[in-house]
Image: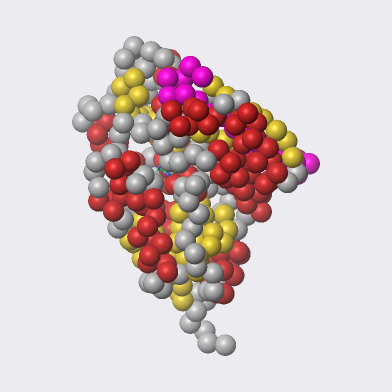
Amino acid sequence: MSSTLSIRLGTRSSPMAMAQVERVRAELLALRPELTVEVVPLTTSGDRWTGPLSELGGKGAFTKEVDAALLAGDVDICVHCVKDIPGDRPVPEGTVIASYLKRDDVRDAIVEPQGRSLNDLPPGARIGTSSPRRAAQLALHWPHLAPIPVRGNANSRLAKMEAGEYDALMLAVAGMERIGLTERISQILPTDTMVPAVGSGTLALQCRVDDTLALELADLLGDDTTDRITTAERAMLRVLGGHCHSPIAGLATMDDDGVLSLHGRVISPDGKTVLDASQRHSDPEVLGVGVGDELLRQGAKQIIEAAG
Ligand SMILES: NCc1[nH]cc(CCC(=O)O)c1CC(=O)O
């Protein structure tokens, strides 16, 4: 067999995305030192656009060009944050999410220049976040604070805060770890207060359906537990029919006995209506559908539709 097997990894070009793809490259080379791994940074319309994301079609703006590069054969494996894969729009035909890497920290964090936590901030303090899930849970627990929209990658958000556009920022711990800025975190929010996004802290590998080498390599890197918890969370998201601007949260965990637990939450933007559902099951799909259905029975559809 020829000794030069090569594979091209596609990714967005932000510092966080580049760190993610470096993890994939390192894991691949650790398992298959004979591989030649090339990283191909792709710029998406979402990266170029500085206006509100909703005007670009939401999170799909970040995946469309990446999908096209994969289908065209310009890259062989794409690295995505599961959190950014729309729940209501599967990957395009001809491609597949081949595996999920072992999950990182799922929690959200506060970055505040003086190291203060949310309880110590004065009324009206401006908290930069564009996530309806974060804004709604902020309104629920810290009604004296003012969530305001922020765009751009994590590094540019931090720069805007330093320029005085926000008093604090809410960001994912996993993202801060990836760009090496955990020392900037002033508070980590517990998952029962700030329930994480579906797929938080999880990377997915997407391949062409007929690329046996890429599929084999993606499978080598995949983590079974993460696969099961992600399947449960995304089944719930699918049942709720939410899109990227829906105030939906969900966190699955696996107990020592291998049984999965899933806590789903839907919150109105003002934080005044909170729907919670928690179930346990050993089948991820059954669990996700069960929690999703329970939230629908509680009125989740009205909240999701009213939120826009
Ligand atoms: N929406 C952007 C995004 N997508 C994934 C992460 C962080 C890592 C993750 O949770 O997978 C972030 C940044 C953030 O939310 O602060």
Seen from the viewer's position, the closer of residues 42 and 184 is: 42
Furthest residue in direction bottom, as rendered:
1
Residue 270, compared with residue 292, is above or below; it is above
Magenta-tinted stretch: 252-273
Q: Residue 291 magenta-drawn?
A: no
Residue 127 position, x and y percent, is 34, 25
Residue 277 position, x and y percent, is 64, 28
Residue 60 position, x and y percent, is 39, 50
Q: Is residue 234 visible to us here?
A: yes
Q: Quarter of the image holding residue 260?
A: top right
Residue 71, compared with residue 55, is above or below; it is below
Residue 252, compared with residue 96, is above or below; it is above
Residue at 42 percent of width and 29 percent of height: 307
Residue 30 position, x and y percent, is 55, 65
Residue at 36 percent of width and 17 percent of height: 145
Residue at 38 percent of width and 65 percent of height: 68
**Quick check: 190 left or right of 150?**
right
Residue at 46 percent of width and 47 percent of height: 86
Furthest residue in direction left, as rendered:
163
Q: Quarter of the image holding residue 78?
A: bottom left
Q: Residue 253 magenta-drawn?
A: yes
Q: Is residue 109 visible to us here?
A: no
**Which corner quadrant of the figure contains ligand 1?**
top left
Q: Quarter of the image holding residue 269?
A: top left
**Quick check: 54 left or right of 29?**
left
Which part of the image, by quadrant, shows the N terminus?
bottom right
